[in-house]
Image (cartoon, rainbow, N blue to C red):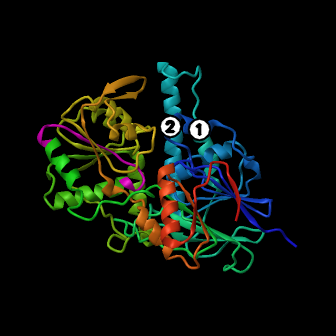
Amino acid sequence: MVNDHLSLTFLGAARTVTGSKYLLTQGGHRRILVDAGMFQGPKRLREQNWEPFPTDPKTIDAIVLTHAHMDHVGYLPRLVKQGFRGPVYATEGTIRLAEIVLRDAAHLQQNEAEDARREGWSRHANPLPLYTTDDVEQTLPLFRAVEVHKPIDLDDGLSMRLWRAGHILGSVSIRMWTGADETTENAAVFSGDLGRHHHPVLADREVPMGAPSVLIESTYGDREHPAPGVAHEAFADLISRTIARGGNVLIPAFAVDRTEVVLLTLQELMEAGRIPKHVPIWANSPMGLAALDVYCDPAMAAEIGPEFAGRRFIHLPTLREARSKEDSIALNNPAQPSIIISSSGMATGGRVVHHLQHMLSDRKNSVVFTGFQAPGTRGRMLVDGATELKMYGRYVPVNAEILQDDEFSVHADASDLIDWLAEMNPRPTTVYCVHGEPDSAKALARRIHTELGILGVVPEQGEVVRL
């Protein structure tokens, strides 16, 4: 009799938000890695990116990606560098965005390594990037585009089907099973990152067919989004008073999806007369601009909500694009009060760090964070009230006004996550709460048990479970 039981090893995003990697093993021999995320945030996590992978990458048969954020795809070139050569399955939207973010990540790492070497602010004698642009170019040919809703054969009797997750363009939840009968109990569901009930731009999320074992994200597993009121009231008020006092508004934003949502929100606030209509809005993220082109591509119409499908949904009259390095440097001291959107969203790297270095000390300026800030990141330090911030080897005093606007989040909150599970048919028997800080994951696990009568588990890093 063929041994086709499934086991799962948690290689990342267990009791932390970043580094999503889950190794599904079928019958002790076939290995599928779900997501290949980079660890971000505290040094103790980032250092894990440099450690040997817990299993030989050459023995991984295939990788399946839920979406193109760095904490889900950013480790992929490192696996290729270590010998992985199998197919990488993802939706067309994820592939197009992954090409953008991986090339940008390699370029950024190479530049930072060179800057550290030249300026001497690294403790390493010869700072190196985690991977290079050459590693990324070896990775991209491994991508295989797959469609949502259709069964996909992964060989050796293992199959999968994808459902839209409503988080970013191309994002999916995954259901895998063994054998010819899709309704078998020898199956598992991976939520990926789930969007809220309604995304400002994308088609709504979907609920996969159930399975006995489900992995669910828990980023906001211990909290609820603000009740609907006057949309982005604090954000609009901050912009108006900052511009009035002659300052600049810096918005660190994830290049993929968040930049698009922030631009759409600014457009709506301008049209409603809630922020000044004359203020220049700078998109200072080549990666964000490239991602915007993908979002507006008619080929992606099925991914976009019906109100925007097939047309460019951003038409801000004062929008300017800072594509060159010279344009970006000029924005450290704009000619007039401006709104500047730049990545990365947690201020872990990218052009936004240079802007913070120049703008934080001036109390006329403001900084608005538009998403979850992982512990250990510069963004988290600022929203937690840091009075100084270290950048490029020196400390900068924090005098600028700081705001975190949680209304921008496209992560499901705790009730959204419970609703998603409650709609699943058949009901799972065990739910593993991943992709969340310990308190958040534990809170969600308790709610799952209390409200749904399902066992909620918070796995440990490196833990192996038989499904």
Quarter of the image with the N terminus is bottom right
Is residue 97 among what the camera can see?
Answer: no
Badge 2 amino acid: Pro
Residues shaded magenta: 243-258
In three-dimensional space, the C-alpha distance between marks 1 and 2, rounded to whole angstroms, equals 22 Å
Quarter of the view holding residue 299? bottom left
Quadrant in the rendering for residue 328: top left
- 96 within the magenta span: no
Could you say where residue 189 lies in the image, as x and y percent from the top left? 60, 68
Q: Tell me which residue sits at (35%, 52%) in the image.
A: 259
Left or right, 425 with reference to 290: right
Q: Earlier in the sequence, mark 1 or mark 2?
A: 2
- Residue 378 image point, x, y percent: 40, 36
The vertical placement of 364 against 104, above or below, is: above
Residue tagged by mark 1? 132
Residue beneath the point at 38% across and 37% down? 381
Element on which disc 2 rests:
loop
Q: What amino acid is found at the position of numbered circle 1 in the picture?
A: Thr
Name the disc covering residue 42, or none: 2
Quadrant where the C terminus sits is bottom right
Judged from this view, the residue extending furthest toward the right is 1
Image x and y of residue 332, in percent: 28, 33
Residue at the spot x=49%, y=74% of the render? 422
Name the residue: 60% across, 55% down. 35
